[in-house]
Image (cartoon, rainbow, N blue to C red):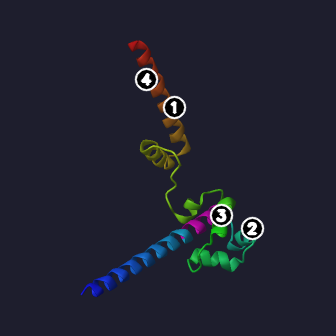
Amino acid sequence: MSTHFEIIFILCFICISFCDIICVRVILMNNLKKLRAERGLTQRSLAVALSVAQNTVSQWELGSRSLDSDSLSRLSAFFGVSADCILGLPETPVGLSDFEFALHEETRRLTDEDRDELLRMARRMRELMELKEQNEK
């Protein structure tokens, strides 16, 4: 009886792993195509810039070819983004507290003007806190 459970467990693990691979490929192909389109590049021009065949770029975007670490590194450098960004993983700045990371995530969605306003508000709040501390002394 336990053999059946082991087989079912192994099959479930394989299915989950396969689904994870498909999800990563779908995200990769969407992110890569988006980055390329945002910069007005064709598959051919990106291929030339990376010294790969145009067919390779096409296969990456279709999800029929995996990215090796060297290609991922070159794409990251070319587009000026992290490998996490290309792979669709959340970019976690190193060394941030939970609060700082949450703030970072929320501000990523703001316009530049909104970020400037938020920064002005934070500085003003700090000034008010310093004044309050001085008055309490």
Dot 1 corresponds to which residue?
120
Dot 4 corresponds to which residue?
129
Please say if 134 is above or below 64.
above
Neighbourhood count class around disc 3 (C-alpha, 10 Å): few under 14, some 14–19, many 20 upward: some
Mark pair 3, 4: CA separation: 44 Å
Mark pair 1, 2: CA separation: 41 Å
The residue at the point 65 percent across, 56 percent down is 80
Mark pair 1, 4: CA separation: 14 Å
Is 29 situated left or right of 2 in this image?
right
Amino acid carrying label 4: it is: Met
Mark pair 1, 3: CA separation: 36 Å
| Residue 36, magenta (yes or no) | yes
Mark 2 or 4, nearer chain start: 2
> Circle 1 — which element?
helix
Amino acid carrying label 1: it is: Arg
Quarter of the picture containing the N terminus is: bottom left
Residue 10 x, y percent position in the rendering: 37, 81
The label number, if any, that marks residue 73 in the structure image: 3
Q: Which residues make up the magenta segment?
A: 30-40
Mark 1 or 4, nearer chain start: 1
Amino acid carrying label 2: it is: Ala
Considering depth in this image, is 128 or 72 the residue closer to the camera? 72
Looking at the rendered image, the disc whose residue lies closer to the viewer, 1 or 4, is: 4
The residue at the point 61 percent across, 63 percent down is 35
Mark pair 2, 4: CA separation: 52 Å
Amino acid carrying label 3: it is: Ser
Mark 3 or 4, nearer chain start: 3
Dot 2 corresponds to which residue?
49
